[in-house]
Amino acid sequence: MKEKTSINLRKSMNRGSVEQETKIHDKPGEIMKIASDDVISIPPSKSIKDTAKVMMEHQFRRLPVTDPGSGKVLGIVTVMDILDFFGGGNKFNIIEKKYQDNFLAAINEPVREIMSRDVVLLSDKSSINEVVDVMLSNQIGALPLVDADEKLSGIVTERDLALSLAGEMDDRTAQDYMTTKVFTTTPGTPIESACKIMVRNGLRRIPIVGGEADISKAAKKLLGIVTSTDIIRFFNTKEFFDNLNSNAASEILEQTKLTEIMVKDAITVEPEDTIGEICELFKISNIGGVPVIKNDVVMGIITERDILRAIKGL
């Protein structure tokens, strides 16, 4: 690991004995031992602005939307939905068309306008294996769990599964499961462009590269990272609202560069680091993905979803 990495993976973890094969328990109801049963949900009438605040306050990447009377799940809203709304995709039309670019009016729209209604649900009697299969096949990061009356009783995330099962991993490494096709950008990229890159490609984080006169090297030298949460946190700051010279957010989106909000001391791993070590890093650092680097050059990126693939042996 490089000195600039804020956590030294090899020094902060012990390489104890590990299981030699992955064992996913397949007993009905086992998922509730991993899932969170103290679920924070929101009504469909909650404003987009207040929804983003709840996410940042609790460090959640998604919130189930439930009917206040029945407790049944009506939808789910994620950081990507918020990012889409703020300027990354089709949901930005609410600001541009319905409110003629009046950002301050649009953020008070109810969250029902941007939530995902086609929610995949599973019974709280499901097995861990069922949940992993459904998450991977649907490419989703969380599953609301419901009881026999179809009321929300829990939620389980990729992170919950990755951290709970990581101890059963063998010596498989980051280079075995990392994504090598990495979308990167530069510090001078406007937030507006970063939102579009993330939403259109389904990315929750983008490594920031540059800093070399030789363009071939600059395209891969890591300078930092920006996540969807970093961007939404920026939208929640007093500074953002103070800098609005009009009701239009587009001016700030275009003028503010990633260098102002990116994490410059990015946590990274190396290709040879094990999946178990990486999961421990995710846990102690409260992150869901990291660039994989060698000699300061980005070789790939590994996320909680990649960990699930490793657990399943895919």
Image (cartoon, grey):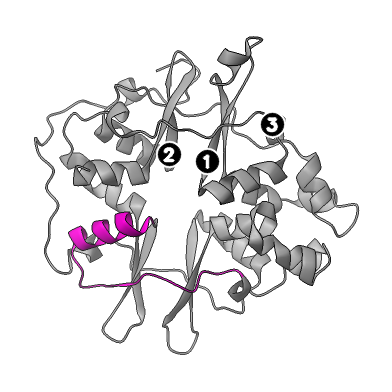
Marked residue nearer the N-terminal end (2 or 1)? 1
Q: Which residues fall within the magenta stretch?
A: 114-139
Q: Is there any visible trace of residue 236 in the rendered image?
A: no
Q: Which residue is mark 1?
A: 205
Q: Nearer the viewer, mark 1 or mark 3?
A: 1
Q: Secondary structure at mark 3?
A: helix
Q: Is residue 42 magenta?
A: no
Residue 149 vertical position relative to residue 278 in the rendered view, above or below: below
Label 2 is placed on what type of residue?
A: Gly
Q: Give the SS element for disc 2.
A: strand
Q: Are marks 2 and 1 in contact (CB under 8 Å)?
A: yes
Marks 1 and 3, how far apart at CA: 14 Å
Q: Amino acid at mark 3?
A: Thr
Measured from the top left, where is residue 217 in percent x and y? 56, 13
The image quadrant of residue 123 is bottom left
Q: Where does the image place residue 278, in percent across and percent down from the top left?
A: 32, 33
